Image (tube, rainbow, N blue to C red):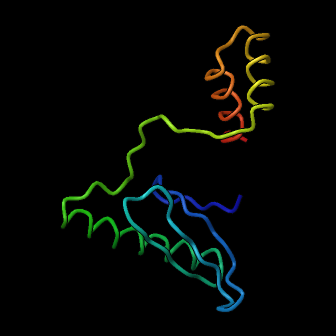
Amino acid sequence: MNLMTVEGYHARIEYDEDLDQFRGEILGLNGGADFYGSNPKELRLEFKKSLDVFLDVCKEKGIEPRRQFSGKFNLRISPELHEKLAITAQAQGKSLNSLAQDALQKIVLA
């Protein structure tokens, strides 16, 4: 993953071939904020500037800058995969939710 972190905020970084620059999009916000840079140092500086502007606007408008998450989401999978996961969870003495949470935790820590 091409992630950059500044002050606890994360941005996905992609290369924009048309502009010959890197583009960053700050993730997990209650709105959009992006930035561009030609190299990592410039990108990090522009990330900080964009974040500061976004946070200032949120403060002026009384908006919480970070999107809030409930801890719940729906996942659509095939019935065959659902069955295999349910059997695996039972075999491990876990709930399906616990099995899925463990698997997802491994992905975000990798």
**Rendered location of residue 92, percent (x, y):** 76, 11
Name above or below for residue 101 compared with residue 59: above
Left or right relative to 78: residue 55: left
Taking the view exactly as shown, the residue that stands out farthest to the front is 79
**Residue 23 % position (x, y):** 60, 77
Residue 41 is situated, as x and y percent measured from the top left of the image, at: 60, 75
Q: Nearer the viewer, residue 93 or 110?
A: 93
Q: Residue at horizontal 67%, vertical 73%?
A: 14
Left or right: residue 30 versus residue 34 is left
In the image, is residue 95 above or below residue 28? above
Q: In this view, does 29 lie to the left or right of 106?
A: left
Residue nearer the viewer, 75 or 108: 75
**Which quarter of the rendered picture does the C terminus lie within?**
top right
Query: Considering depth in this image, is 74 or 47 the residue closer to the camera?
Result: 74
Q: In which image quadrant can residue 82 be found?
A: top right
Image quadrant where residue 54 sits: bottom left
| Total numbered badges shown on the rendered structure | 0
Residue 30: quarter of image: bottom left
The answer to whether residue 20 is above or below residue 90 is below
Query: What residue is rendered at 64% in x and 79% in y?
Result: 22
The residue at 19%/65% (across/down) is 61
- Check the picture and name the quadrant holding the N terminus: bottom right
- Report x, y in % for residue 38: 64, 85
